[in-house]
Image (cartoon, coloured by chain):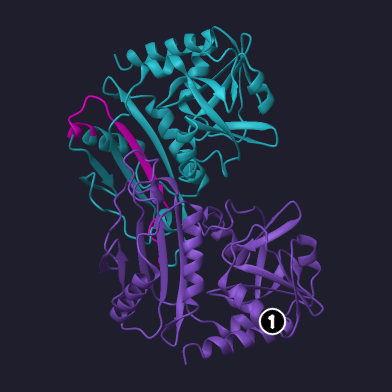
Chain colours: A purple, B cyan
Amino acid sequence: MPFYQYFNGEILPIDSPVFKTNDLGLLRGFGLFDYFRTYNGVPFRWDDYWQRFENSARLLKLILPVSQQETEKVLADLHALSGEQEVAFRFVLTGGYAPDSVNVVQPNFLIRTEALPQDNPAGRLKGIKVLPYDYVRDLPEVKTTNYVHMVLMADELRRQQASDLLFHKEGEISELTRSNIFIFQGDKLITSDRNILKGITRKVVMELAKPHFEVEIRPVMYKEVIMADEVFTTSTTKWVMPVVQIGDLPVGNGEAGKRTLFLQQLFEKLVADWGK
Amino acid sequence: MPFYQYFNGEILPIDSPVFKTNDLGLLRGFGLFDYFRTYNGVPFRWDDYWQRFENSARLLKLILPVSQQETEKVLADLHALSGEQEVAFRFVLTGGYAPDSVNVVQPNFLIRTEALPQDNPAGRLKGIKVLPYDYVRDLPEVKTTNYVHMVLMADELRRQQASDLLFHKEGEISELTRSNIFIFQGDKLITSDRNILKGITRKVVMELAKPHFEVEIRPVMYKEVIMADEVFTTSTTKWVMPVVQIGDLPVGNGEAGKRTLFLQQLFEKLVADWGK
């Protein structure tokens, strides 16, 4: 798998050191990213991911150095060079090199080609445990690179055999470290639109759910999650993933819910047929 | 000025690209730094800065790859290579290269040699304007690389001819983006110890102030800053800098206060004689 990366107009081997050390992403955490993948060799919901990337850049006042069309060509090149049927792409846009370590001059734009995470269909049926965590992301609408708490808590998650953190603040939940959260109250599907990064998988799942369930978009309280009939989380890598335990408490009877598994099947069918 | 940098055991020209793109500092904002300088060719309060750096690393659960003594030798080498009498050093410690973009394997340790910021003695007599900003730093005791708000607001600061942001949350102030804040109520000098990075200049100024003023360390309310007789901020680059305007409001009569200027002189004398 000879993966390559794109950096400011050049294509380079994935292991090349490319960043000089006065980059604002590195020195000041001033950066954003996005991450998506192919199914059947075709980038999934590419327009949506690009739009979100553009939106993050706009909110951090960074000017994208390339157009969507130019970027599409780069993706095709990186994909071809990988020799793989399926790949993931990680976009990283930083504030660029700053002589004074404060002011943006020209952003740096990186695209990494990455191997897909190992698929785990059994895990998707079994569901995951999450730990409640008192936190709300700063600038939640921007996919910034700030994931300090996730990295800091990685050991503790392993120790408690949990997969992720559920962020809550003042009784209201927002999201997991890298994924959105939904609850079922009976046949009503509820998800928050406050203090979250609006996931593309979240959007797709809402589209899939609408013909079958009442979908309610509003702030969600931590207590509601604890009391929900079913809970699941959505992301590019997790797809539709049942949440079966929150801290010490089981969700419902502690098994993946039937409505969740139904949406999971719809999503799996969609991506299985993607691009065909 | 042929400045060099140290990266994981190697000395390299300052402009070399050294970071591979799967570094957790870059991808996840999982990094910390420190910054200090020489006076008369001697690093100022080196033990204090090293201790703070060690403390930041410990709080992010990162193991320092080198000892203080080994680092001292690197500093001497970088200093000699620079050919300059005075230099600044920037330490950056990141979570290192992560195959899964989540788990720390081995930190990356960078030391950059940098030119001193231009000294501006007239500006120190005149004082600065700051803008109040509703924010409190996440993990304030750690000198993390997260300065998104500072970079984001750089344009607005320029537009309003302000030098920095004054962070406050729920009526309580904490710090400026990169410096601590003190107020004088009459002859009483007050500074907060909550939600702040404990500055070395702050520590030195408290030592200098103690024989002359009552020093009170406690939470400080935004209203107290507005109503204070004098306000100043301290940092490695700002020294003792009068704050003469907060948003639209002048501090006192809008000029640098006499007690502030007295402390400023004590500090300037200390650094002028440093290492002699």
Which residue appears farthest toward the front when viewing the image?
B159
**Position in image of residue A185 (x %, y %):** 81, 74
Left or right: A27, with B251 as reference point: left
Q: Quadrant of the rendered structure where residue B139 is?
A: top right
How many numbered marks are there? 1
- Residue A165 painted magenta: no
* Magenta stretch in the rendered image: B79-99
Residue at 32%, 59% in the rendered image: B20
- Residue B91 painted magenta: yes
Assign the N terminus of chain B to one quadrant of the image. Answer: top left
**Position in image of residue B217 (x %, y %):** 63, 22
Closer to the camera in the image, A200 or B219? A200
- What chain does badge 1 belong to? A
Closer to the camera in the image, B231 or B41? B231
Left or right: A209, with B96 as reference point: right
Assign the C terminus of chain B to one quadrant of the image. Answer: top left
Left or right: A1, with B157 as reference point: left
Residue at 66%, 28% in the rendered image: B222
Kindly identify the amino acid type of the residue bearing the numbered disc 1: Ala
Residue position marked by numbered label 1 in the rendering? A209
Tell me if residue B231 comes above or below residue B23 in the rendering.
above
Tell me if residue B219 can be seen.
Answer: no
**Position in image of residue B270 (x %, y %):** 39, 13
